[in-house]
Amino acid sequence: KVNPSFSTVASVLAGGSGSRMGVKTLKQFLSLGKKTIIQTSIQAFKSSGLVDHVVVALPGGTLSLYEKEIRSYRFGKFVSVIEGGLTRQESSYATLQYIEKLGGAEIILIHDAARPFVTRDMIKNSVELARKHGQPACIIDYDAPPRAALAHTLAPLLAMAPAVGAPGVTSRAIQQAAGAHRTRVRAELGRGAPAGSNPAKQAANDLALGGIPVIFAAEH
């Protein structure tokens, strides 16, 4: 967009229900020390000094329940709260439409609200790679069984699907990378992961096959 209103905006997807954790509230509103998980995620972007605005997308039908909670964090005009969709893709697309109404942004970072330990370096590297290559992905190096790898590393990739159009990255490339990752992980589910395999690094390789630059961060 020519002369956008913002340099960098973070789209924070707050759609996790917490059903697998057996809790009645949305998991991103659970306490993490003295703050909630989503509050910690938003604070990471504010404290970085690299993000101009944050748009939080709540699950459909929950805006009246949780918008007041987010307002109580006192981020003021730094944060907008909107109603997302029933899926991660729908919520990410809703934030993109909302950012467009605000005047657009040069760079949009898509982040899962339930991942509160994002660091300034991750944000800085994401912004720099986005400016240089168009559409990077940030992956945390961790050891996990194949099923967890499928859930955690495929989700952010698919969330990017509505945001295609960046230089050198097409929807076809994203779908090819997603397909390669899905096929490999499901195969490992059937036969067992090979000894010494690293799901996160394998996911990074799958993304690279689709032409998507990868920020590979150490687990912390």
Image (cartoon, helix red, strand yellow):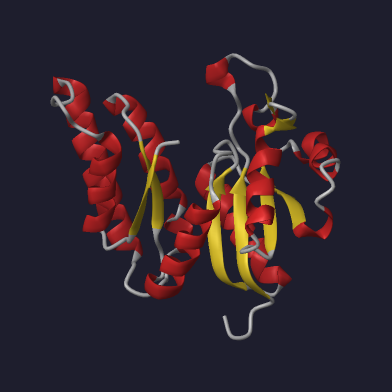
- Total marks placed: 0
**One can see residue 59 in this view:** no
**Residue 72 on image: x %, y %:** 86, 40
Q: Nearer the viewer, residue 6 or 93?
A: 6
Residue 68 sits in which quadrant? top right
Q: Nearer the viewer, residue 213 or 157?
A: 213
Q: Can you say whether 122 is above or below 106 in the image?
A: above
**Residue 162 on image: x %, y %:** 47, 59
Residue 29 sits in which quadrant? top right
Q: Residue furthest bottom?
A: 2
Residue 200 sits in which quadrant? top left
Residue in view at x 56 percent, y 56 percent: 93
Residue in view at x 36 percent, y 27 percent: 148
Quadrant where the C terminus sits is top left
Q: Nearer the viewer, residue 203 or 22?
A: 203
**Residue 67 on image: x %, y %:** 80, 42
Residue in view at x 60 percent, y 54 percent: 11
**Relative side of 185 to 45, left or right:** left
**Relative side of 105 to 36, left or right:** left
**Residue 192 on image: x %, y %:** 17, 21
**Relative side of 130 to 168, left or right:** right
**One can see residue 199 in this view:** yes
Quadrant where the N terminus sits is bottom right
Q: Nearer the viewer, residue 148 or 214?
A: 214
**Relative side of 206 to 69, left or right:** left
